[in-house]
Amino acid sequence: MNKDTIAAIATAMNNAGISIIRISGDEALSIMDKIYKSKTGDKKISLMPSHTIHYGFIIDDNIVIDEVMVLIMKGPKSYTKEDIIEIDCHGGIVVTKRILETVIKNGARIAEPGEFTKRAFLNGRIDLSQAEAVSDIINAKNELALKNSMNQLRGNVLNKIKVIRGSLIHDLAFIEAALDDPEHISLEGFCEELSTHIDDSLRELNMLLESSENGRLLKEGIKTVIIGKPNAGKSSLLNVLVGADRAIVTEVAGTTRDTLEETIQLDNITLNIIDTAGIRTTEDIVEKIGVDKAKRTALDADLIIYVVDASANLDENDNEIINLITDKKAVILFNKSDLDIIIDPKEIERLTGKEVILISAKENKGIDLLEKWIIGEFFKGQLNFNDEIYITNMRQKEAIAGSIKSLEMVKKSIEDEMPEDFYSIDIMHAYELLGSIIGEAVDEDLVNTIFREFCMGK
């Protein structure tokens, strides 16, 4: 591993109360001895105890750049397990960059994106799943996503994977030992025991795999597409959900010609809402483009909200929309329920198999029922963060799916009474795939790719 001393600005580059410059590596303390001057002028940072804070000045060629606080964290009791210095300076862009330039001038180099966390991983402080959780914490869109990422940072994925891998390697070692020394170690009756162990591992892995859908929704948000005929109240619904007049609302049918996207928080769940053009048969070329885009957008949705004007009869355009939502997770909102309703909700529920909720976007009524439905439909009414693990990472999901496939091959080999060395091949493959989740046996290119997605200074 490159042992250069690295430095970067760890806070956002804008005017603020303070900025933080982070330094990590063998030369961190000696660099500070060159550029730091205490108030009394007699303190050397390298001689100060770890995990202490010191007040003084950053100087360059005997010129004072700024008044600072310096935090010392000596390795291995630091984030990277190396010597770390954090300089808290005034939050101006110019002064922050000037201090960083002084640090670089005296022996450090600019850190690559994510290099501090990469060093924490390479130095064994955290595993790869915990490193990815750091990035998820930074990018968390809601409270539940943050809690899930914190659970992963505390090692719940690591611990689960270690238990499963431990079982696999124990069985693999027994098979290999028996094949090497059949006179003293017998495999008689072992297939039944192995089958039980594989079933246990498959049960745990399938639970992790099933959690990945909720994990994705927690991390990325629910892609929610609002569709309906023109003037059904789609844009009014969007404005109510966003809490602002985001979409133009008029009595003229076809006002919305293109998609309009907003992100909202709904009871700590993120909804990525897309308002679309009203779906209807039209000769207007521009409107037709919007209608076609609305249909394509709905195909990729996690949730479709079909808004119906409950005060008007259904027509062939509604039939087209109903066909569009047949195989999708969807809810039907009977808007304008403050007027006379001429459509039977029960009949629509029977026809579509989707739940109907009565609302009035104009009077902001029934929106709470929509919120409860979404929470109940996607997360069974609640999310439990005591012991639950939600896989949010596609790389981890693919590794789990691959290990399940390998273990199912082991089960098939047992059922077909294949030779034991067939078991070993697939068990080892599952073991290695699970190891890739926590960072064992991963190549350098993958590690570099993962950490390149981090922000600078983390």
Image (cartoon, rainbow, N blue to C red):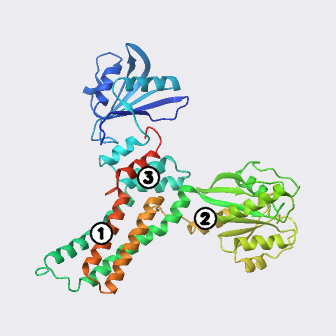
Secondary structure at numbered mark 2: helix
Q: Position of residue 446 (x, y in %)?
A: 39, 52
Q: Position of residue 3 (x, y in %)?
A: 29, 37
User: Is 150 placed left or right of 260 in the picture?
Assistant: left
Query: Of callouts 3 and 1, which one flags the residue occurring earlier in the amino acid sequence?
Result: 3
The residue depicted at 79 percent of the width and 74 percent of the height is 319
- The alpha-carbon separation of the residues under discs 3 and 1 comes to 26 Å
- The alpha-carbon separation of the residues under discs 1 and 2 comes to 40 Å
Residue 133: assigned label:
3
What kind of residue is marked 3? Ala
Which residue does the numbered mark 1 point to in the structure image?
428
The residue depicted at 25 percent of the width and 77 percent of the height is 421
Q: Quadrant of the N terminus?
A: top left
The residue depicted at 29 percent of the width and 20 percent of the height is 43
Towards the viewer: 394 or 160: 394
Q: Quadrant of the C terminus?
A: top left
- The alpha-carbon separation of the residues under discs 3 and 2 comes to 24 Å
Q: Position of residue 104 (x, y in %)?
A: 38, 26
Q: Residues within 10 Å of mark 1 (few under 14, many from 20)?
A: some
Q: Nearer the viewer, mark 1 or mark 2?
A: 1
Residue 330 vertical placement versus 50 (above, below): below
What kind of residue is marked 2? Ile
Q: Nearer the viewer, mark 3 or mark 2?
A: 3
Q: Nearer the viewer, mark 3 or mark 1?
A: 1
Secondary structure at numbered mark 1: helix
Which residue does the numbered mark 2 point to in the structure image?
375
What kind of residue is marked 1? Met
User: Is 147 placed left or right of 291 in the picture?
Assistant: left
